Amino acid sequence: MPALEYVAGESMTSPEFSANSEQNWPWPESLETLVAAPDHHAILFENKELRVIRTRVLPGHLVPWRTHRWPCVLFILSWSHLLRRNHLDGVTLDTRQEIEVPKLNMPIWQEPLPPHSLENVGGTEINTIQVEIKTTR
């Protein structure tokens, strides 16, 4: 898998967890990104088809468990190394060891993500924009 796909996170491509199917999303609303981690996420725009979120994580900060229900296009504005952990507290991504540094401001596709936390273990802020796609045509 190319490095940029790793940056975007572990993919959920199973039709069992269709991003656009309310009945198939198995995680509670309390784990929705903006509910579970409001200190790190802000809505920039939302309508029935799209939601645009800015995510900011300062060095040393831990973003609590949350999900990303919809697929999105991710733009990394500033980068820092991170640890992503799954709901069992297992490390699923350590960018210090597993990937090359991504190019900034380049679109990256990201599938929906199951429960995970993210810790900024680098020396600079993580700053991203996610354009979530809530519906299909």
Image (spheres, rainbow, N blue to C red):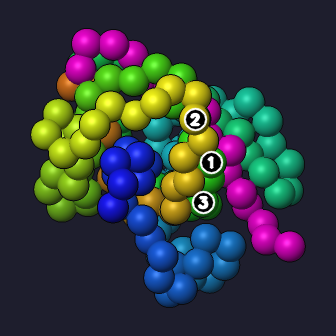
Q: Give the label on residue 106, or none.
A: 2
- Magenta part of the protein: which range? 122-137
According to the picture, the residue beneath numbered tag 3 turns out to be 71
The residue shown at (79%, 36%) is 45
Q: Is residue 27 left or right of residue 7?
A: right
Task: Bin the neighbour count of mark 3 within 10 Å (Cα to Cα): few under 14, some 14-19, many 20 and up.
Answer: many
The answer to which quarter of the image holds residue 19 is bottom right
Comparing marks 1 and 2, which lies closer to the viewer?
Answer: 2
Estimate the x, y position of residue 130 in percent, counting from the top left.
Answer: 61, 41
Q: Across the whole image, how many numbered discs are drawn on residues?
A: 3
Please state if 93 lies on the left or on the right of 108 as rendered.
left
Q: Closer to the N terminus: mark 1 or mark 2?
A: 1
Residue at 47% in and 44% down: 36
User: Which is nearer the eye, 7 or 90?
Assistant: 7
Alpha carbon separation for disc pair 1 and 2: 10 Å
Q: Is residue 118 magenta?
A: no
